[in-house]
Amino acid sequence: MSVVSENGSFLTRLPIVPELDALRGIGAIFILSYHLWPSPIFFGWTRADLFFVISGYLITSVVLKYGGQPNFLLKFWIRRALRTWPPYYTLLTILAIYGWGHDRTPNVKGMLTYACFIQNVPGNTYVFVWPFYSNAIQTWSLAVEEQFYWIWPPIIILTGRRFVVPIALLAILQAVIGRILEFEPYFILSRLDGLAFGSILAVTINNHERTRHWTKGMSLFLLSVGMVSFPLLSVIGTNFEKTIVAVPGCGPISILVINSLYFSIVGLTILHTGHPLLGLLRLRLLRYIGKISYGIFLYHLLIAKVVKDSCGFSIIEQHVLTVGLSFVAAIISWEVLERPCVSLKSLYPYEAVGFEFTRCYSPVRNDK
């Protein structure tokens, strides 16, 4: 499947890679499992890195495809706001109301920290000032992505395609150095490598056959190296490198290895979309979980808190209720709030003309 017609002209829309929705769904299941049963074997702490790689790929692909049109940045930012803001601010509103109802004294600066997507900024003491907002601490990764949406598209437009890969490689190096130097682990400069890996995918996959073959070879190589090195780092990580968050083996190098693994998985998935071996990733149920994964991500900690505070439930019952209610809340959020807001993106359509250098040869999901 190609986004270029037989006569060489761009197609109006970028085709969809259905398997990416399934990867999102798997990521949501991982993080839900990890927060209920904290164990590195669930890889829930890597969920953000998977989403970063996917987002880096999608965002960069869209900018390369449509970035040359007038008012692109304004349309892009409006479309992203329509997708991410409504459920996010709904969560913050619920937290504020529920917190006040439980005699929690609100902290205005803490609330503004979350409202402005700066809860991941180094030295930000307001993340935990109002205790009830601990049920939204997972949104540090959303803050990273929102900051990426503001920064990365203008850089691509100003510098052009040929500088995307060099800048992305520098971002990967900077992120690793930042983690080694013990920067705030949730700050964007410490977590740029996943987004940068995804951006490299967008350039190499969407360019021409030579770089597509390079991407396939590099993905297989990194997949092989990562499958060997990551288990070793998980076992000896605390001796080999300093753990930067409260997860065994989650250190500066381990996160780089995880991102390279996700680079491989996402890259091979895109390159082989439609392949029979990827049939599991095209299951409608798994793809639907991917569609509602944003709601699962946003609401599950709040639901877990409410269930835990309720009387008379055993641990197993709490977990079952949390999983079930998280899915129910996510479905309601998608059908009632998110889907209608996403439909409004049609009011701000991208034109089919982008940069001259963005001749694409592979499918990319056009949901950005």
Image: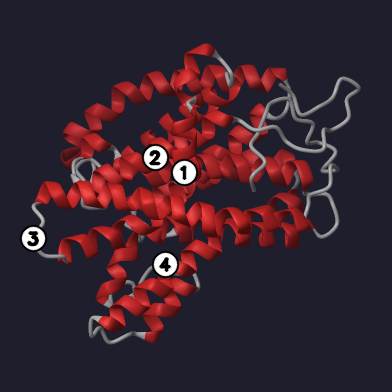
Would residue 128 appear left or right of 111 to someone viewing this image? left
- The image position of residue 151, as x and y in percent, is 62, 59
The kind of secondary structure element at disc 3 is loop
Q: Which residue is mark 4?
A: 91
Separation of marks 3 and 2 at Cα, in angstroms: 31 Å
Q: Which residue is mark 3?
A: 312
Say which label, 4 or 1, has the lower sequence index.
Answer: 1
Say which label, 4 or 3, has the lower sequence index.
Answer: 4
Residue 51 disc label: 1
Type of residue at label 1? Phe
Q: Are marks 4 and 3 in contact (CB under 8 Å)?
A: no
Q: Are marks 4 and 2 in contact (CB under 8 Å)?
A: no
Nearer to us of marks 4 and 1 is 4
- The image position of residue 359, as x and y in percent, is 79, 31
Nearer to us of marks 3 and 1 is 3
Q: Residue at x 40, y 49 (%)?
A: 177
Residue 27 disc label: 2
Nearest the viewer among 311 and 278 is 311
Separation of marks 2 and 1 at Cα, in angstroms: 8 Å
Say which label, 3 or 1, has the lower sequence index.
Answer: 1
Dot 2, how many residues are within 10 Å of its Cα: few (below 14), some (14-19), or many (20+)? many
Separation of marks 4 and 2 at Cα, in angstroms: 20 Å
Q: Quadrant of residue 228?
A: top left
